Amino acid sequence: MRIGELSARTGVSQRLLRYYEEQGLLVPRRDTNGYRVYDDDAVVTVRQIRALLAAGLSTCVIREVLPCARGEKPELEMCPSLVRTLREQLDALDERIDDLRQTRGALAAYVPASG
């Protein structure tokens, strides 16, 4: 299928699909005219990419874990690199949450109590 059909089937713009290609997340073939040609598995791959982005992962991390993705949920096969990467992402997120809590506390100290 061409990029327009993939866009229609996934609800993702053609521009975003080209971005996924630039990021190494989608790898279409090229026909003799140079048009991108995607196989049917690309629909599942795009859904996986969208779900992983929604989970807060960057395209760099997704490129690393995408080979472990199976199914449409996406269900992720727990290969060692995936587990390590996801743990690292959770640790980084926990650090950001701690930093935000500290920042919120410092800011709240400047706000007078209403009453």
Image (spheres, rainbow, N blue to C red):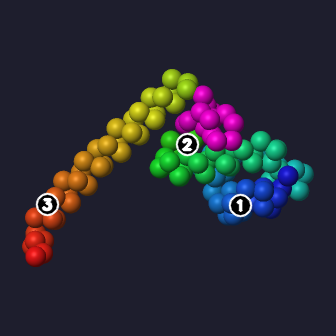
x then y, percent, for residue 89: 41, 40
**Within the magenta stretch, is there residue 113?**
no
x then y, percent, for residue 25: 64, 45
Closer to the camera in the image, 94 or 42: 94
Q: Quadrant of residue 27?
A: top right
Mark 2 sits on what residue?
62
Mark 1 sits on what residue?
11
**Left of 19 or right of it: where is 43?**
right
Please tell me whether mark 3 sits on a helix, a strand or a loop: helix
Which mark is on residue 83?
none
Among all residues in the image, which is located at the extreme top? 80
Please tell me whether mark 1 sits on a helix, a strand or a loop: loop
Closer to the camera in the image, 101 or 60: 101
Q: Earlier in the sequence, mark 2 or mark 3?
A: 2
**Left of 18 or right of it: where is 64?**
left
Among all residues in the image, which is located at the extreme front? 115
Q: Amino acid at mark 2?
A: Ile
Quarter of the image where the C terminus is located: bottom left
For the point 55% across and 26% down, which residue is it? Answer: 78
For the point 83% across and 50% down, which residue is it? Answer: 37
Closer to the camera in the image, 38 or 115: 115
For the point 14% across and 60% down, which residue is it? Answer: 106
Residue 86 visible here = yes
x then y, percent, for residue 75: 62, 35
x then y, percent, for residue 105: 16, 58
The Cα atoms of the two marked residues, 3 and 1, are separated by 42 Å
Q: Quadrant of residue 87?
A: top left
**Left of 52 or right of it: where is 89?**
left
Mark 3 sits on what residue?
106
Q: Earlier in the sequence, mark 1 or mark 2?
A: 1
For the point 10% across and 71% down, which residue is it? Answer: 113
